[in-house]
Amino acid sequence: MNTPTDFRCGTVAIVGRPNVGKSTLLNHILGLKLSITSRKAQTTRHRLLGIHTTEDTQFLFVDTPGFQQKHINALNKSLNKTVTQVLTEVDVVLFVIEPMHLGDADRKVLALLPKDKPVLLVVNKLDLMGDKGNILPLIQDFDLEFPFIEIVPVSAKKNLNIDELLKSIRQHLPEQAAIYGADELTDRNERFLAAELLREKAFRFLGDEVPYGIAVEIEKFEMEGKLRRIHAAFIVDKESQKPMLIGKGGEKLKQISTEARQDMEKLFDGKVWLETWVKVKGGWADDERALKSLGY
Ligand SMILES: Nc1nc2c(ncn2[C@@H]2O[C@H](COP(=O)(O)OP(=O)(O)OP(=O)(O)O)[C@@H](O)[C@H]2O)c(=O)[nH]1
């Protein structure tokens, strides 16, 4: 039994360029698919707090958006602002990279890391390294670029070294009692989670057909006894993307919605009635006002 002073609790931000495995890492730690993973770059647009509670520690994870340098528009500006703000608020920062890659995209994120916070360098995708010995020169190079408090190689996908990573994070969290109940997973509300699940399914089913210009708006979320009644709109950038999302005879939208609804029912532990449709909002990614109305 821990006395309150043994207990540690604090916030952790996960940053890194797109596709290094930030969402996969968070999912493995949380053991529940609350965050969005995809082969596509930059699918995590929202801040999301995942909570992992062990016997002696409560980790409050803040997932931060990826970086995208190719298309600079209002959406990306607002993403970068979010990252900077998150980093000033947390106790520990995890900077995630892939082995053998320290490209310009990594360096752009590196430039934003706070010097007054403990930053751990997490080298993910260790399983892709044929000869593990090769990682050493890379690690030494990285150490010269930033005063990392520690360097931890992991594989989020293969669950390698994740416990060690958690132990390292714990050392830098403040001693304090847990803030949330042990069974709480996220402070995001169900409305947000419903939108995230729909967006994830759309990404999965559409492959490369509909790129980043897709959002989900929950227009109605009502409880009827134990039933959740949800009306959601997919918002695409161009008229030409609409039929791709709907599919022949509405088949694609139906598949996306059915899978999202099944995940929602598991997550909310109750029946869900879901109605979805597709709307075109031309150039929404460039319109700051539109972004605000969508909650970014
Ligand atoms: N081989 C291998 N693949 C991994 C590992 N971790 C993540 N991946 C894969 O890398 C890809 C990107 O993972 P994500 O978790 O979506 O990456 P992310 O950094 O969150 O990306 P954004 O949301 O775009 O910022 C996915 O295809 C994952 O399956 C790992 O440890 N090993």
Image (cartoon, rainbow, N blue to C red):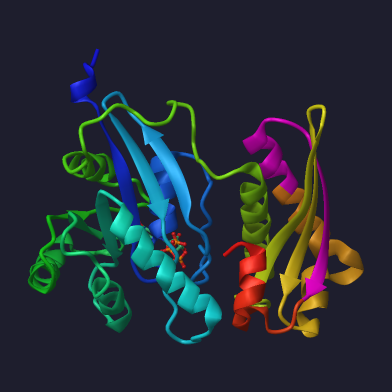
Left or right of 48: which side holds 231? right
Q: Nearer the viewer, residue 155 or 37?
A: 37
Q: Residue at x 28, y 44 (%)?
A: 162
- Whether residue 274 is in magenta: the answer is yes
Which span is picked out in magenta? 261-280
Q: Is residue 257 visible?
A: yes
Q: Measured from the top left, where is residue 236 in percent x and y?
A: 73, 75
Left or right of 100: which side holds 189? right
Q: Is residue 256 above or below residue 6?
A: below
Q: How many marks?
A: 0
Q: Nearer the viewer, residue 147 or 284?
A: 284
Q: Residue at x 32, y 54 (%)?
A: 89
Q: Residue at x 62, y 59 (%)?
A: 200
The quadrant in which the N terminus is found is: top left
Left or right of 12: which side holds 65? right
Q: Quadrant of residue 237?
A: bottom right
Q: Measured from the top left, where is residue 33 in percent x and y?
A: 53, 46
- Whether residue 268 is in magenta: the answer is yes
Q: Measured from the top left, where is residue 108 in percent x and y?
A: 29, 78
Q: Nearer the viewer, residue 134 or 46?
A: 46
The quadrant in which the C terminus is found is: bottom right
Q: Quadrant of residue 123?
A: bottom left
